[in-house]
Amino acid sequence: MFDVEGDRPDLIVLIPDTGVLVIDILQHKASAVVKVADGRLTVTDQGETSTISDPLSRADHFAENLASRIRAAGISPVDELPVAAMGVFPYVDADTAQSKMILGVVDADRCLFRDDLDRINNDLTQARHVIAGVMAAPLREVISEPAERLYRAVIHPDTVLTPVQMSLPEVDGIEMDVMALDREQENLAKNLGAGHRVIRGVAGSGKTVILLHRARLLAQLDRRSRILVTCYNRSLHGWLERQLSPYPNVKVRTMAHQLGEVLRMGGAPPAEFGKEPDDDIAARAMAVLDDVGGRARSQLFDHVLIDEAQDFGAATLRFATTLLRDGSESLLVVADAAQSLYRKGFTWKEAGIEASGRRTKVLTRNYRNTREILDYAWFFLSRSASVSSADSSDAETDVIVPPGSGLRHGPLPLFRLAQSPDEEVLNIAKEVGKWLTEGESPGDIAVLYGSKSAGDFPWTDKLRFAFDRAGVPWYWPTDPADQAKHLVGSRNDAVMICTVHSAKGLEFKNVILCGYLNMLPSEEPETNRRLIYVGMTRAKERLVLSASGNHPYIADLERGPVSR
């Protein structure tokens, strides 16, 4: 990354309480070094002679380049770390380095030789002492977690997943809330192991981040392999497709699209989604795969990765497992029962997914929302007696993972109770206009509604009219007439008006939620609560909930940790 010719150092060590150490290693034995002149080493390798830079000079070059990139990223002065370089000679001891004149071209105090490595082997205290000497910097307070993620994004750009609102992987102007994997997420993506795997986690825990990084790794490891990434809604599909567009061996499809492809291949009647149960469609598609035999190869994959698995029934997930070619068990399933809008009630094994014990990972840490938004959303969701915990449900797909602590703090969510929906719409237009005046980017604002006709009120028509009158730029990607759900979250020049359903899996800095009290709690209590929870947890920093009337949920919304 750090060299214009695409070269890289052997190792970069980020020590949050010390600094960043760039290490380059001489891979040649002492006997291979035949000459030292003009600050360069002449070495032989399998009969070939070449002249190379010494590892410390290379490390210095990389460190200088890295330091400039870190400065350009806009790290807060409070979190600035020194960047140092080290050369390592694992096959050359200090005496040999002296006799071969290597010490004439390198600073011995910033190098490790074989005898140094033997001395610090398995002695972490001694290793830290050596590193501190090279860094020439005292211990300091550990940098903040957002800053560590930003350092990791600059050092290791393949862990960065780029929301459309950001300019990454370019370095200039990186935001402190950069969407990069932390160490736990990166290790999980790289070391899932063979076989079926399930990742369950709270909203904002990085499940989709891990899935995307896993897909990238698989695509890079074998460019001949065929990889399917599938999800439930078209909005998330569009975002996933943009993220994975550089990889031609990755197919990104909604599950509905994949089911339709199989049915078309077999000449079966097309699926009627919304009229025919999804699991019935999946059963027909599995029958097609059985019937067509070898012709099904075009629909089989080496790896299958499923996001939003909580929204699929058992037969649909079983269909996904049959898309693996013979001999492959590379299946990754990502789910969050709290975001399921339909209670499924089955075990993974019943869906053909063998992921018991250590094959299932649970993520509880929330990276998206502020602590204030997370506490409010969980308070509201947990008021439902039907929320299943790990001890209260035998159906694995219904178990909700309680969120751990949020990493950031921000303002309390704002709950506004109006006299009527018309007053709500006017208040929303004023609020958005105020944010824009304060300097917020339109693309960082989403107005989400549960149903466009909740309470027999024309939410989308009224919102668009109010925004036009207030001079607020807007776009409506879920307009049924445009079929543009893949554009959700893709514009920076306009405020997005969108359904909560279509915003699943996405996030926005500022969210206003309205039109969600569309049914009595006695009719669909769990569905409606989860819908509101999903809407709340789309907000990264600022959340406003608007309501009117006498809906029973209003008491819970007012009772939570909220500002009015």
Image: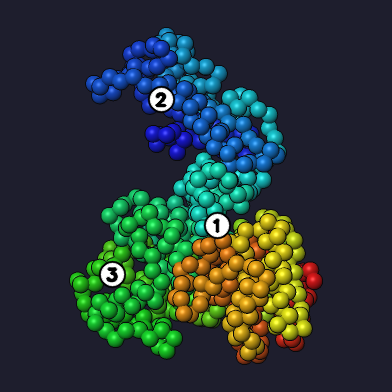
Looking at the picture, which amino acid does disc 3 mark? Gln
Which quadrant is home to the C terminus? bottom right
Q: Residue furthest left?
A: 294
Q: For the residue labelled by badge 3, is the local secondary structure a helix, a strand or a loop?
A: helix
Q: Which mark is residue 494?
A: none
Q: Is residue 385 left or right of residue 64?
A: right
Question: What residue is drawn where x is 48% and y is 67%?
Answer: 487
Q: Which mark is residue 165?
A: 1
Q: CA distance from mark 3 to mark 2?
A: 47 Å
Q: Which residue is mark 3?
A: 299
Q: For the residue labelled by badge 2, is the local secondary structure a helix, a strand or a loop?
A: loop
Q: Is residue 430 left or right of residue 356?
A: right
Residue 405 seen: no
Q: Which residue is mark 2?
A: 26
Q: Earlier in the sequence, mark 1 or mark 2?
A: 2
Q: CA distance from mark 1 to mark 3?
A: 33 Å
Residue density around tag 1, few if under 14, some if 14–19, many if 20 or more, within 10 Å:
some
The answer to which image quadrant residue 213 occupies is bottom left
Residue 163's place in the image compared with 265, above or below, is above
Colour mapping used in the image: rainbow
Q: Position of residue 352 (x, y in %)?
A: 39, 74
Q: In front: mark 1 or mark 3?
A: 1
Q: Foreground residue, 432 or 164?
A: 432
Q: Position of residue 179 (x, y in %)?
A: 55, 53
Q: For the residue labelled by badge 1, is the local secondary structure a helix, a strand or a loop?
A: loop
